[in-house]
Image (cartoon, coloured by chain):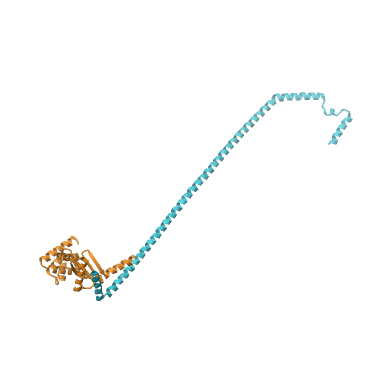
Amino acid sequence: MIDLAQTTILAAEESGDGGLDLLLPATPELIAGIIAFALVFFFVRLWAMPAINESLENRQKAIGGQMEEAEKAKVDAERLRADYEAQLAEAQAEKTRIFDAARGEADTVKSDLIAKAEAQAAEILDKARADAASEKARVMADAQREVANLTVDLAEKVVGSSLDRQTQLGLVERYIAELER
Amino acid sequence: MSERIAGYASAAYALASAEGELDRVEQELFAVARAVETSPELRDALTNPALPTDRKESIVRDVVGAHASRVTVNLVSMFVAQGRGGDLPEIASALTEARAASAGKAVAEVRSAVELDEATIARLAAALERKTGRAVEVKAIVDPSVLGGIVTRVGDTVIDGSVARRLRSLRETLQTR
């Protein structure tokens, strides 16, 4: 590439017109071009620029409004999120509180039920023991009474048949002797 | 003693006294009372409410008539007719006590398993008089339930020296030990 530019410059220098002339347009053409550019610039500045500026302004306003709305929506969303999180935290706390209360109540009820059941069991056991002891004592007393009755009934029969007249008179004599003392 | 028993005994005392047979009637009534006391059949017959009164009086005449005076038979018949056949032992005891009281004595009802001879009864009476400080008339009763020894009752005082009492005591001891 450098070789090509050097070659062109060298060729222009060799032609004798000077190098810059090769690049610059002719003066009339330059003036006409400047006038044409001015005219175009004037018309553009007069009609197109305001419309373009208005359009840009509108566009900018619309974008600004949308950004505001977006910002507002974002703020609303943030607020909603905060509210939601607050409600969630409150619900969580409420849930925890209810769970704790329910657990506490359940523990209390459980403890009460266990204590009541234990008391009832102890009472039933005591009553059963007392009944058993009472029944045992009653049976023992009945057995003792029965044994006593059988023993004495047998003794009565033995005594009744074994006391002859002589023995009977001896008992009478002892009775009178006791009276006479 | 109930007022009714005392009333019957008083009537018997008055009637027997009026007839001049107090001692005999008292002894016979006492014997009849012992028979009623010791014979369930005789007691049932004389106290059975289903048995007609004339039938009961007929039984009295059959059982008592041959061995007792007319006054005694009439008195027993009257008691039975009034439905007091079961009260004969108490009426007889009341009559005995009334007669003894009129003589200034207390009645000692002596129960023994065997019959006591006169000498034993006399010794017993003397011992009881010393014990109670009163003149005593002994009424001896043979009662097999005594088993052995003697049970004496003078008024409300009971002196129990019977084998039955010892066996009762043994029974109570064995039952409560």
Query: What residue do we see at 30% from left, 67% from top?
Result: B169
Which one is in front, B142 or B52?
Answer: B142
Query: What residue do we see at 30% from left, 72% from top?
Result: A155
Whether residue B87 is situated above or below residue A43 in the rendered picture: below
Whether residue A86 is situated above or below residue B166 in the rendered picture: above
Percent across and percent down for residue A60 are 65, 30
Which one is in front, B154 or A150?
Answer: B154
Q: Is residue B89 left or right of residue A142?
A: left
Percent across and percent down for residue A89 are 55, 42
Colour of chain B as rendered: orange
Q: Quadrant of the C terminus of chain A?
A: bottom left
Q: Is residue B161 visible?
A: yes
Whether residue A9 is situated above or below residue A171 in the rendered picture: above
Q: Is residue B51 visible?
A: no
Percent across and percent down for residue A18 are 87, 28
| Figure quadrant of residue B29 | bottom left
| Figure quadrant of residue B124 | bottom left
Q: Is residue B64 left or right of residue A137?
A: left
Q: Is residue B12 left or right of residue A44?
A: left
Chain letter tied to cyan = A
Which one is in front, B149 or A124?
Answer: B149
